[in-house]
Amino acid sequence: MMIIRVLSALVLAPLFLFLIYLGGKYLATAIVLLSLLALREYFNIGRKAGWLREEIWPSVLCAAWLALFWLDFQSWLLPALYFCFFLLMARYVLVFPAVSFLEIIFQISAFFYPVIFFTYLQRLRDLPDGFTWCLFAVLTVWLTDSAAFFIGSAFGRHKLAPRVSPNKSVEGSAAGLIVAVAFGGAFAFTVRLAPLWLAAPLALAISVTAQLGDLFESALKRAADIKDSGRVIPGHGGILDRFDSFLLAVPLVYYTLFVYFGN
């Protein structure tokens, strides 16, 4: 299993970075495909957890929103999101009480967690020096995950969130934070796109957010009583299993840069 996991990473990680480098429609197409796969996994979790019974309408609406994203109709995205929310709430009212309020909330959350959060990778790529910032975000998440895994496996004694993910430790989490801050400092001194006071705290925030995203997806799987969200990636599980740390971290980087550079 470990060999398969490593081989998958060696093949898919460079491909992922190459698509980010290409940007444009190449990256947008990849984001749409990843979002749709992640959405299917998210709905599968919802069904098994008892939060979702009907997924056709939210699936169609999410797919339509992603089509607007792929076509680069940026000015339409927010109005379309409002319209989708309106339809879901209207359906809740019209078929009440056949559809529970929890199910509507879960359907609405599907727009953000596996769909909209993914598209922020494109937004980040489109900023000035966007590829470098995407690389910064990706490497910070990967370094956090790697440090937390190896240090936690070797020295972990105190459980971080035993009810959610029994194998994660406080020691591993702390190692991930330290490595992320060190990388942020190195980034500030070598690449020089941001001062140390911005790069290091941003790396720390990415590390915290990445670990929270990982634990959040673990909690979802616990509620659904499943081990992996899917089987798309050999040795890694599903799309959500592989990208759970990125989904919350990338919007954080985008908005930080948006505020700092005033774009």
Image (spheres, helix red, strand yellow):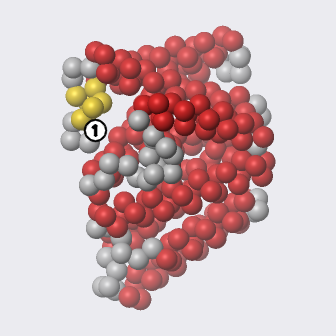
Q: Would residue 189 appear left or right of 42 to someone viewing this image?
A: right
Q: Would residue 173 appear left or right of 260 to someone viewing this image?
A: left
Residue 186 in view, yes or no = yes
Viewer-closest of 82 and 247? 247
From what the image shows, is residue 188 above or below residue 15? above
Q: Tell me the kind of residue under disc 1.
A: Ser
Viewer-closest of 86 and 118? 118
From what the image shows, is residue 6 above or below residue 194? below
Of the 4 image quadrants, the one containing the N terminus is top left
Residue 259 in view, yes or no = no
Residue in view at x 64 percent, y 63 percent = 66
The residue indicated by pointer 1 is 165
Give residue 223's position: percent from left, percent from top. 27, 55
Residue in view at x 62 percent, y 56 percent = 33
Q: Would residue 47 appear left or right of 2 to someone viewing this image?
A: left
Residue density around tag 1, few if under 14, some if 14–19, many if 20 or more, within 10 Å? some
Residue in view at x 64 percent, y 15 percent = 188
Give residue 97's position: percent from left, percent from top. 30, 85
Give residue 184's position: percent from left, percent from top. 57, 18
Of the 4 image quadrants, the one containing the C terminus is top right
From what the image shows, is residue 132 above or below residue 174? below
Name the element at disc 1: strand
Viewer-closest of 262 and 122? 122
